[in-house]
Amino acid sequence: MYSMVYITASGVEEAKKIAKTLLEERLVACANIISNMESIYWWEGNLEEDVESILLVKTRSELVDKVIDRVKEIHSYQTPCALEIQIKSGSKDYLDWLDNSLEKH
Protein backbone atom coordinates (compact mmCIF):
# COMPACT_ATOMS: atom_id res chain seq x y z
CA MET A 1 0.00 0.00 0.00
CA TYR A 2 1.09 3.56 -0.69
CA SER A 3 0.49 6.92 0.94
CA MET A 4 0.93 10.61 0.38
CA VAL A 5 1.88 12.80 3.32
CA TYR A 6 0.52 16.36 3.39
CA ILE A 7 2.95 18.70 5.15
CA THR A 8 2.74 22.45 5.66
CA ALA A 9 5.90 24.54 5.91
CA SER A 10 6.79 28.14 6.69
CA GLY A 11 7.73 28.75 3.05
CA VAL A 12 9.30 27.30 -0.07
CA GLU A 13 12.82 27.17 1.36
CA GLU A 14 11.76 25.11 4.37
CA ALA A 15 9.63 22.85 2.15
CA LYS A 16 12.65 22.25 -0.12
CA LYS A 17 14.89 21.48 2.87
CA ILE A 18 12.41 18.93 4.22
CA ALA A 19 11.84 17.43 0.75
CA LYS A 20 15.55 17.03 0.03
CA THR A 21 16.19 15.42 3.42
CA LEU A 22 13.35 12.91 2.97
CA LEU A 23 14.47 12.14 -0.60
CA GLU A 24 18.15 11.74 0.30
CA GLU A 25 17.20 9.37 3.12
CA ARG A 26 14.98 7.39 0.67
CA LEU A 27 11.94 7.83 2.90
CA VAL A 28 9.96 9.28 -0.02
CA ALA A 29 10.15 8.85 -3.79
CA CYS A 30 8.75 12.21 -4.86
CA ALA A 31 8.00 15.60 -3.35
CA ASN A 32 5.77 18.33 -4.76
CA ILE A 33 5.84 21.87 -3.39
CA ILE A 34 3.00 24.34 -3.74
CA SER A 35 4.06 27.81 -2.63
CA ASN A 36 1.91 30.54 -1.11
CA MET A 37 -1.10 28.99 0.58
CA GLU A 38 -3.15 31.26 2.85
CA SER A 39 -3.65 29.61 6.25
CA ILE A 40 -6.01 30.66 9.03
CA TYR A 41 -5.87 28.60 12.22
CA TRP A 42 -6.11 28.57 16.00
CA TRP A 43 -2.79 28.67 17.85
CA GLU A 44 -2.53 29.00 21.63
CA GLY A 45 -5.99 30.60 21.87
CA ASN A 46 -5.43 33.13 19.09
CA LEU A 47 -6.71 33.17 15.53
CA GLU A 48 -3.61 33.35 13.29
CA GLU A 49 -3.18 34.13 9.59
CA ASP A 50 -0.08 33.09 7.66
CA VAL A 51 1.25 32.33 4.22
CA GLU A 52 2.67 28.81 4.07
CA SER A 53 3.81 26.27 1.50
CA ILE A 54 2.39 22.80 0.96
CA LEU A 55 4.67 19.81 0.62
CA LEU A 56 3.15 16.59 -0.76
CA VAL A 57 5.38 13.52 -0.56
CA LYS A 58 4.72 10.03 -1.88
CA THR A 59 5.93 6.87 -0.16
CA ARG A 60 5.02 3.36 0.95
CA SER A 61 2.52 3.28 3.81
CA GLU A 62 4.99 1.31 5.94
CA LEU A 63 7.35 4.32 5.88
CA VAL A 64 4.82 6.98 6.90
CA ASP A 65 5.64 6.87 10.62
CA LYS A 66 9.35 7.35 9.81
CA VAL A 67 8.49 10.24 7.46
CA ILE A 68 6.40 11.96 10.13
CA ASP A 69 9.05 11.41 12.83
CA ARG A 70 11.75 12.85 10.56
CA VAL A 71 9.58 15.85 9.66
CA LYS A 72 9.07 16.56 13.38
CA GLU A 73 12.87 16.47 13.91
CA ILE A 74 13.76 18.95 11.15
CA HIS A 75 10.69 21.22 10.94
CA SER A 76 10.76 24.74 12.35
CA TYR A 77 7.23 24.45 13.77
CA GLN A 78 6.61 23.26 17.31
CA THR A 79 3.64 21.23 16.03
CA PRO A 80 4.08 20.59 12.29
CA CYS A 81 1.20 19.37 10.17
CA ALA A 82 2.05 15.97 8.67
CA LEU A 83 -1.02 13.98 7.65
CA GLU A 84 -1.19 10.64 5.85
CA ILE A 85 -3.50 10.28 2.85
CA GLN A 86 -3.73 6.65 1.77
CA ILE A 87 -3.53 5.88 -1.93
CA LYS A 88 -6.05 3.16 -2.77
CA SER A 89 -5.01 2.74 -6.38
CA GLY A 90 -2.91 4.31 -9.09
CA SER A 91 -0.96 3.76 -12.26
CA LYS A 92 0.97 0.49 -11.97
CA ASP A 93 3.93 2.01 -13.81
CA TYR A 94 4.02 4.95 -11.37
CA LEU A 95 3.72 2.72 -8.31
CA ASP A 96 6.51 0.46 -9.66
CA TRP A 97 8.68 3.57 -10.14
CA LEU A 98 7.82 4.68 -6.59
CA ASP A 99 8.93 1.30 -5.19
CA ASN A 100 12.17 1.36 -7.16
CA SER A 101 12.93 4.93 -6.06
CA LEU A 102 12.69 3.99 -2.40
CA GLU A 103 15.32 1.27 -2.68
CA LYS A 104 18.92 2.12 -1.90
CA HIS A 105 21.10 2.04 -5.01
Image (tube, grey):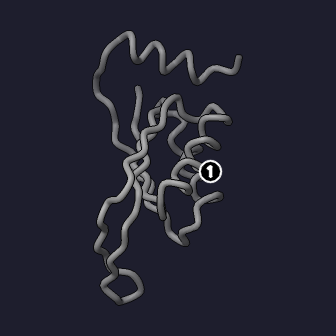
User: Which amino acid, mark 1?
Assistant: Arg
| Rendered position, 8 above or below 86 | below
Image-based side of 39 in relation to 83, left or right: left
Q: Position of residue 34 (x, y in %)?
A: 37, 48
Q: Nearer the viewer, residue 53 or 28?
A: 53
Image-based side of 7 in relation to 102, left or right: left
Q: Position of residue 85 (x, y in %)?
A: 34, 42
- Looking at the rendering, in which quadrant would you find the C terminus? top right
Look at mark 1 in the image and give the residue it sits on: 70
Q: Nearer the viewer, residue 30 or 87?
A: 30
Which quadrant of the structure image shows residue 53?
bottom left
Q: Nearer the viewer, residue 50 or 27?
A: 50
Task: Tell me the residue at 45%/13% (across/down).
Answer: 96
Image-based side of 3 in relation to 19, left or right: left
| Rendered position, 42 above or below 53 | below
For label 1, count other residues whose C-alpha is less than 10 Å away and answer few (under 14), some (14-19) or many (20+). some
Assign a secondary structure to mark 1.
helix
Q: Position of residue 54 (x, y in %)?
A: 39, 52
- Looking at the rendering, in which quadrant would you find the N terminus? top left
Image-based side of 15 in relation to 8, left or right: right
Q: Position of residue 59 (x, y in %)?
A: 48, 32
